[in-house]
Image (cartoon, helix red, strand yellow):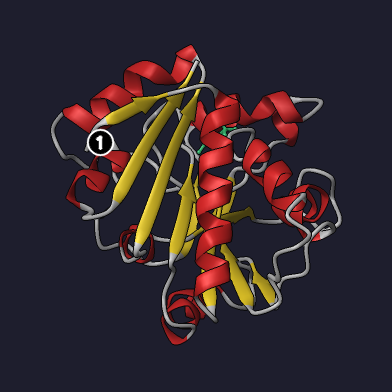
Amino acid sequence: MRIRSNTYEKVCHLIASNIRDKVKHQSHVVLGLATGSTPIGIYEKLSKMKNTNFGDTITFNLDEYVGIDKHHDQSYQYFMNKHLFSNLNFRKHYFPTEENWNEYDLMIKNSGGIDIQILGIGTNGHIAFNEPGSNRYSSTRIVDLTENTIKDNSRFFDNIEDVPTKAYTMGLSSIMGAEKIYLVAVGKHKKEILEEAVHGNITEDIPASFLQEHPNCEVYYSE
Ligand code: PGA
């Protein structure tokens, strides 16, 4: 694995174009999608691809907060509607929820598995909400968010007390099962953890380091 550095604009263009090409050439595509500030530019590019038919594509989001209504403006369902789903018609989109989290990995498997997975990285090395200490073979589950993650995410809330402390997260097993992964880190504050994840030891302490074992993971960094 190596880190490819480029402008955010170019990284988003490349990933969105690769998704479009996959959707054009394969009849039934399954995308794994992330929320947060990192993928917004990718969704902006995809949203403009009105000539591509995404009607046979289904999506599985990585995570969602526990105890937050899907209409709440900080829910990940709200985020995805705003940035992507209101602009493009997918066949179906799924999030891990109270009703389905126990079957989420099976739903992914039954859909044929994830073709392309977009990932950001937390400043503590998490991917999705697989926080440090997460098992390489973990399944989709409910997790406690770390202090670090709650603090990082508090920028989107009025008070830190309003940030949910639990989330449903896709496990590392389904993420590692994706055919292709794009790991994207944006900003100087992500550089050190990205380098550790890519070049350091493979360890539960930095869940993103497991991606070193993935056969087809591309890593992008933009300042
Ligand atoms: P960000 O979050 O895209 O908002 O930086 C990434 C993450 O925590 O996985």
Of residues 104 and 178, the one nearer the viewer is: 178
Quarter of the image with the N terminus is top left
Spot occupied by residue 175 in the image (x, y as percentages of width and height):
38, 59
Label 1: how many Cα within 10 Å (few below 14, some 14–19, many 20+) = some
Residue at 72%, 30% in the rendered image:
161
Of residues 109 and 13, the one nearer the viewer is: 13
Choose top left, top right, bottom left or bottom right for residue 192: top left
Of residues 7 and 83, the one nearer the viewer is: 7
Q: Quadrant of ligand 1?
A: top right
Up-down relation of residue 61 to residue 14 (above or below): below
Spot occupied by residue 8 in the image (x, y as percentages of width and height):
56, 26
**Residue 20 visible, this orientation:** yes
Residue at 26%, 46% in the rendered image:
211
Choose top left, top right, bottom left or bottom right for residue 155: top right
- Along the horizontal axis of the image, is 206 left or right of 29? left
Up-down relation of residue 170 to residue 109 (above or below): above
Name the residue carrying label 1. Answer: 205
Spot occupied by residue 2 in the image (x, y as percentages of width and height):
24, 32
- Along the horizontal axis of the image, is 68 left or right of 120? right
Of residues 37 and 219, the one nearer the viewer is: 219
Residue at 84%, 58% in the rendered image:
86
